[in-house]
Image (cartoon, coloured by chain):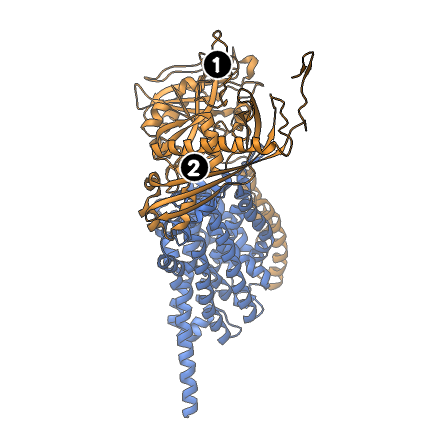
């Protein structure tokens, strides 16, 4: 078993919240506005609510197998082979979303900040950073997340607060967006935006028991829901739904609009700071989770020898997509729309099988 | 790259600790010196400068962009930028202007600034073409204004605004001006006035709406959003070059009547001297096409109706002596209250405007400062603003433009975007029945609390 080190609820909440909330800096909000219009800011609360419900399955599963992590439970419940497939899907998924996230970050960075830098340079420098942090281990990633979280939080809130001058309340209407049914459907389907809370179940051994995982998971999803909703509400108040869905990075564009006279303007650096640090933590954590699951699958005791090759895979995977539209409309949209299958449906299937088997064993015991 | 340095330090500490552990475990420890060397090599290489960094002296910072209809190609693009040579060196230094293939040439030096005009097929190709003749790379990070000629605006600016909005260097906080005549000529007259910095001149000029209300504060963000909005339609700052022909040197003296001070369109202010550039009133758009214009006074009234007015001086007739005037500084502390109901598909709108003010002068020396006479002045201004509001609303209805942006309130009556878009407020507005009401309170009387008569040999005057 890989030694991951221990961490507490605060660290866990910080890590998961950063991973979830960082999505708001990229193209996801524009896509959500495209589908739900002015209802986007509460559609995400529906997503968060659904994710809380989905996380309950994971918690119940962990509760049934105290001291075990999700990957071990897969093997216990489904057997070595099917459990291996389930774990493999999880591992590939995390590496895939880390790569997609990295490419999305690099593309947006290139659009707004580094238009002349080759993509390989941007991704390469980033992967270099993820390699170092991965080498330092999960405990370092988590502690760094906790250390950065107040700074990211202050920056995040400041941008929204300073955008006050551009808020126009009427933009919140029509209040039901494209209709309640559409909002509900998209809200539920996009629960995967909060699915990364499942990381806590993967690293269950590093937290102090199931109750801590439960608290951390619920708190992270709840806080992320509020933070994402507040950001989306800000976007809705600053941009009419007709133009909000066009913008690559709404948060960046909103920051560029802050203009309080000649002295308080051009606050893009605040955005870059929270953007870079947040994304760096998120990608490293997602990638590390994927590699960690891989090591579990193949009973590899030391993760370090796997990290450099895996980082090369991360680099290569991030370079694969042909262009930005494929990233946005294919990868990002696809993962948001169908990610719930991986995050919540798979653990639910395992939970059902586990409960049925336990019931059967119990029944058999009674019969005997 | 900001995060790499702290990481490197942490990493080295970590390596030391882990190496100890590795030694204890008997594992092959990593070569600390090698790792350290690699980390520092990469960091020092990356810290020497960003991959695509550009030094300040390699760039030409564009202050103003002008777009006219072209003669030898689709567009006539004008860019005005600093020569970085300072006003004193301007005559001999600077970059000068240049001409392009088929383009007009205008290298007029303007006290440390220059403008280049060129006929180009598109905005971006135009930048590339101009870059070939400027020994710097044009940079738009500090651009202050985007100027369209009226001719261009009347044909539609949507096709030209879209690429500009997409361009990462141009901030959406730049101001959008529609100028009468050519944008190239307008930019040529855009010179530093009071002081030597054009950027400061422009920034302070653009703050005008907060002091006078004679032209609106319109940015690229406003015009682009409103062009695509289902709630309202855009306006732009109206500007022109005043050739001082409106100023009549001689003629019969003006009688006892007076103008409000804002009853002019850009370029008509009767003046001579000062900056030739004039921003006054606004251009009204339907989508991306200019369909009309408002005078300075109408613009103020529009801003009052919208709740965007900060302060400005209104001159009204003295209620007791109509041949004399009372200038009042009016400010808007409370946003207007708008109530809308629908009678079938017809919107019925009630607009209630609240204004406050301060007496600046009383020519007649009648004591309007007293509690008894104050309401007389208040009612007089209320009537004036109300009649102007009604006139403006009618002008808007004639153009079928919701100048006071009632759509912002009307939208709250619709549950879904489909219903709202099906209703099509921008079209239905012409059916609207609008009632206005103005409340004005004189809060202060300036530096005097009473107007005493002038004493002459004949007695009190």
Helix, strand or loop at mark 1: loop
Chain in orange colour: B
**Whole-percent x, y for residue B416 in the image:** 36, 52
Q: Which residue is mark 2?
A: B404
- Residue B384 or residue A10, whichever sits in front: B384
- Residue A140: which disc? none
- Residue A196 or residue A122, whichever sits in front: A196
- Residue A81 or residue B75, whichever sits in front: B75
Helix, strand or loop at mark 2: loop
**Whole-percent x, y for residue A261 in the image:** 57, 33
Chain that bears disc 2? B
Chain in blue colour: A
Q: Which residue is mark 1?
A: B109
Of labels 2 and 1, earlier in sequence is 1
Res A356 seen here: yes
Quarter in which the N terminus of chain B is drawn = top right
Q: Does residue A180 appear to the left or right of B18 in the view shown?
A: left
């Amino acid at each position: 078993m890989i030694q991951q080190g221990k961490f507490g609820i605060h660290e866990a909440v910080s890590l998961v919240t950063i991973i979830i909330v960082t999505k708001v800096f990229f193209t996801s909000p524009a896509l959500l506005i495209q589908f739900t219009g002015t209802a986007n800011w509460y559609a995400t609360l529906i997503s968060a609510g659904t994710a809380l419900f989905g996380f309950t399955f994971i918690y119940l599963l962990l509760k049934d197998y105290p001291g075990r992590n999700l990957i071990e439970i897969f093997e216990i419940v489904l057997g070595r082979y099917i459990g291996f497939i389930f774990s493999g899907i999880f591992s590939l998924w995390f590496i895939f979303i880390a790569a997609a996230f990295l490419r999305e970050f690099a593309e947006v960075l290139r659009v707004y900040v580094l238009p002349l830098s080759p993509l390989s340079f941007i991704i390469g420098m980033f992967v270099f950073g993820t390699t170092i942090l991965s080498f330092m281990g999960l405990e370092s990633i988590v502690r760094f997340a906790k250390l950065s979280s107040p700074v990211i939080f202050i920056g995040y809130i400041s941008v929204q607060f300073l955008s006050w001058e551009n808020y126009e309340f009427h933009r919140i209407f029509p209040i039901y967006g494209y209709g309640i049914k559409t909002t509900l459907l998209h809200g539920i389907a996009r629960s995967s935006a909060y699915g990364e809370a499942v990381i806590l179940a993967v690293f269950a051994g590093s937290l102090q028991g199931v109750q801590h995982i439960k608290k951390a998971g619920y708190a992270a999803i709840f806080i992320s829901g509020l933070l994402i909703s507040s950001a989306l509400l800000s976007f809705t108040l600053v941009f009419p739904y007709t133009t909000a869905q066009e913008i690559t990075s709404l948060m960046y564009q909103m920051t560029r609009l802050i203009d309080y006279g000649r002295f308080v303007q051009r606050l893009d650096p605040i955005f870059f700071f929270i953007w870079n640090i947040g994304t760096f933590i998120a990608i490293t954590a997602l990638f590390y989770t994927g590699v960690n699951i891989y090591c579990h699958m193949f009973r590899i005791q030391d993760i370090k020898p796997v990290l450099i090759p895996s980082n090369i895979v991360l680099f290569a995977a991030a370079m694969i997509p042909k262009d930005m539209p494929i990233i946005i409309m294919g990868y990002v949209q696809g993962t948001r729309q169908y990610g719930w299958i991986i995050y919540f449906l798979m653990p639910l299937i395992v939970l059902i099988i586990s409960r049925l088997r336990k019931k059967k064993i119990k029944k058999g015991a009674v019969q005997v | 790259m900001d995060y790499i340095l702290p990481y490197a330090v942490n990493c080295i500490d970590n390596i030391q600790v882990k190496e100890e552990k590795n030694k204890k475990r008997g594992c092959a420890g990593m070569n600390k010196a090698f790792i350290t060397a690699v980390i520092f090599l990469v960091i020092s290489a990356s810290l020497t400068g960003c991959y695509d960094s550009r030094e300040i002296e390699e760039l030409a910072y564009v202050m103003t962009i002008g777009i006219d209809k072209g003669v030898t190609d689709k567009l006539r693009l004008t860019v005005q930028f600093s020569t970085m040579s300072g006003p004193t060196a301007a005559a001999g230094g600077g970059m000068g202007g240049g001409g392009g293939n088929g383009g007009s040439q205008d290298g007029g030096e303007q006290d440390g600034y220059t403008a280049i005009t060129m006929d180009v097929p598109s905005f971006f190709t135009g930048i590339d073409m101009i870059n070939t003749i400027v020994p710097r790379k044009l940079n738009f990070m500090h651009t202050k204004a985007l100027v369209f000629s009226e001719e261009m605006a009347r044909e539609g600016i949507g096709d030209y605004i879209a690429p500009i909005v997409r361009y990462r260097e141009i901030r959406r906080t730049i101001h959008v001006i529609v100028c009468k005549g050519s944008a190239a000529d307008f930019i040529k007259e855009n010179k530093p006035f009071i002081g030597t910095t054009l950027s400061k001149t422009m920034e302070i000029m653009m703050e005008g709406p907060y002091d006078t209300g004679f032209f609106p504060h319109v940015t690229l963000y406003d015009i682009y959003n409103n062009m695509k909005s289902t709630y309202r339609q855009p306006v732009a700052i109206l500007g022109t070059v005043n050739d001082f022909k409106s100023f009549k040197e001689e003629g019969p003296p003006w009688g006892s009547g007076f103008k409000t001070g804002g009853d002019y369109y850009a370029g008509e202010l009767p003046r001579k001297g000062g900056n030739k550039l004039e921003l006054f009133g606004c251009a009204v758009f339907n989508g991306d096409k200019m369909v009309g214009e408002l005078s300075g006074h109408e613009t103020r009234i529009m801003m009052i109706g919208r709740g965007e007015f900060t302060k400005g001086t209104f001159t009204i007739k003295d209620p007791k002596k109509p041949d004399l005037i009372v200038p009042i500084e009016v400010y808007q502390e409370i946003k207007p209250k708008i109530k809308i109901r629908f009678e079938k598909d017809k919107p019925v709108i009630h607009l209630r405007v609240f204004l406050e003010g301060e007496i600046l002068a009383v020519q007649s020396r009648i004591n309007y400062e007293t509690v008894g006479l104050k309401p007389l002045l208040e009612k007089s201004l209320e009537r004036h603003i109300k009649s102007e509001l009604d006139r403006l609303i009618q002008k808007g209805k004639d153009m079928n433009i919701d100048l006071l942006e009632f759509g912002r309130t009307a939208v709250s009556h619709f549950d879904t975007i489909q219903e709202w878009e099906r209703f099509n407020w921008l079209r239905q507005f012409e059916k609207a029945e609008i009632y206005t009401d103005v409340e004005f309170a004189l809060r202060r009387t300036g530096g005097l609390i009473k107007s005493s008569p002038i004493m002459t040999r004949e007695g009190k005057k």
